[in-house]
Image (spheres, grey):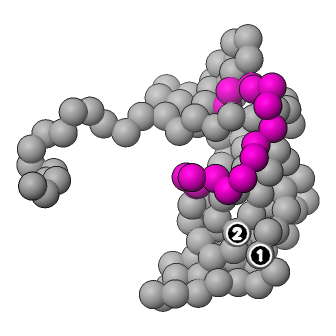
Amino acid sequence: MTASAHNGGIGTLGTFVLDVNNLETCSTFWCQVLGVDVLFHEQGMQGLGREGEHPLMLLQKVAEPRQGKNRAHIDINVTDLEASVHRVEELGGRQLEAHILSEFGIEWVVMADPDSNEFCLVKHS
């Protein structure tokens, strides 16, 4: 049996939830990286997105630090890969791979947010 867009599925993709230790630092970081605002702030969580829209990302404060490799990560499309890496580093992120990776006409750099959550900056040719 194959999945098909015609079968209606059981739901739609909603908000991306990211566990963080430092809610304020990560909120500031992700708002600047994605160009969004804090839509709501409740005890232990913040919803990030654009006014009038469903939150794009939900940051959830957790006590335990991230361990091991992320099983899922965010890809952020950019037009200037080197400038984007530099800007992310200015905002408190860090580059995890020492060089630009390339495959299938796509270039990307593996990065981490201030809480070490991995994501990629991606440039499509």
Cβ atoms at labels 1 and 2 below 8 Å apart: yes
Amino acid at pointer 2:
Val
Earlier sequence position, callout 1 versus callout 2: 1
Residue bearing mark 2? 110
Q: Which residue is drawn at 65% across and 84% down?
A: 101
Image coordinates of residue 19 in percent, x first then y, are 68, 34
Q: Residue at x 49, y 34 (%)?
A: 15
Helix, strand or loop status at disc 1: loop
On screen, residue 56 above or below 90 = above
- Residue 38 lies left or right of residue 56; in this view the side is right
Magenta residue check for 65: yes
- Residue 42 lies left or right of residue 13; in this view the side is right
The residue range painted magenta reads 59-74
Residue bearing mark 1? 97
Query: Can residue 5 be seen in the rendering of this structure?
Result: yes
Residue 2 lies in quadrant = bottom left
Task: Give the overall secondary structure of the magenta segment.
Answer: loop
Image coordinates of residue 66 in percent, x first then y, are 76, 43
Specify few, some or many for label 1: CA neighbours under 10 Å numbering under 14, 14-19, or 20 or more. Answer: few
On screen, residue 123 above or below 48 = below
Residue 122 lies in quadrant = bottom right
- Residue 14 lies left or right of residue 25; in this view the side is left
Residue 61 lies in quadrant = top right
Residue 50 got which mark? none
Q: Which of 123 and 120 is in front in this view?
A: 120
Q: Residue at x 9, y 44 (%)?
A: 7
Which quadrant: the N terminus? bottom left
Amino acid at pointer 1:
Glu
Magenta residue check for 120: no
